Image (cartoon, grey):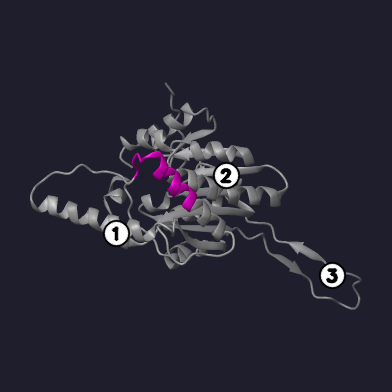
Amino acid sequence: MEPTFYADYYRHENTHWWFRWRFDLITGIVRALRDDAAGELQILDAGCGTGQMLQHLERYGRAIGIDTAKEAIHYAATRGVDRLVLASVDCLPFADATFDCVLSLDVIEHVADDAAMVRSLYDAVKPGGHLIVTVPAFKSLWSSHDEVNWHKRRYTASELRRLVAETGLEIERLTYCNTALFAPIFVARKIKNLRERLSRRHAMARPEISDLSELPRPVNEALYRLLQAETRLMRRTNLPVGVSLLAVARKPLPAVVVAAARTDVAEPSVVALEPIPVALREPVVEEVAVG
């Protein structure tokens, strides 16, 4: 992302309808995982940005944030978040099977090798733990918003399914979201793209702008309420189209082999296959002074 946009994200995260909707959506999923686990979760926010989601996640366990951008870590630290790591998110500096829940929210579209990043996220999840991923959907929605955020791609459901499943993760939920605003956003971005093409044709420079903008409070609140209703609908069904995609996947437990029953053995024996030990990677962590 353009470094100058971190300040905008930091300023808008508490109030903008999109962030508030995403906080509700994601924390609802994490809360359900915590309740099923009957205890605190070890949580990793891989690509934590300016840290507001990380603050929400701290309600449900011990949450750690990692990001490649010094600006992101700085803003996250100013929120009072103290478990922060400045390091690569596509080669995580943690031992394998460390976290009950790993989140990668609108991150993997930024990296050149998204498959390698998802494999790294897989490694960080404990057996029986979960990976939660969100990505932007549909190449047809591409605009300058993607360019200023340094996106490399947008995804379809089949592409995200294949990317996650190839690691060995079991997909429990895959759905489009932000469906209610798909049509107006599609139209708005097509108009925006047309204006930018015309500006380039006439050699008129237009500043690169994100879709993140200040809205009148009634409009902002109405959009948030609309997406709240959609989130309630998503609890009952998957959505067929949307501006974003959500995947929730589970890392399988180690295989269990049950010996065949024999007449001369009272009870069958059960043998758990232990995972093969993997050498720990040396972390590449840089300390950042917070001013």
What span is in magenta? 212-226
Which amino acid type corresponds to the residue marked 2 in the rendered image? Ala
Q: Residues within 10 Å of mark 3 (few under 14, many from 20)?
A: few
Q: Which residue is mark 2?
A: 95
Secondary structure at numbered mark 1:
helix
Point out the tag, 2 or 3, that comes first from the N-terminus. Answer: 2
Compare residues 121 and 246 and report the one nearer the observer.
246
Q: Is residue 200 above or below residue 6?
A: below
The image shows residue 38, relative to residue 56, as above or below, that is: below
Residue 283 colored in magenta in the image: no
Does the image show residue 277? no
Percent of width and height locating residue 280: 55, 44
Q: For this rendering, which residue is in front, 172 or 282?
A: 172
Q: Quadrant of the N terminus?
A: top left
| Farthest residue, direction top | 291
**Quadrant of residue 5 within the rendered picture:** top left
- The span from disc 3 to disc 1 (Cα, nearest Å) is 63 Å
The residue located at (36%, 58%) in the rendering is 154
Counting every numbered tag in the picture gives: 3
Please determine whether, in this image, residue 75 is positioned above or below residue 191. above
Q: Which mark is residue 268?
A: 3
Residue 62 lies, in percent from the top left, at 62, 38
What is the spatial separation of the Cα atoms under label 2 and label 3, in whole angstroms?
35 Å
Residue located beneath label 1 in the image: 187
Question: Nearest the camera: 226 or 64?
Answer: 226
Residue 198 lies in quadrant = bottom left
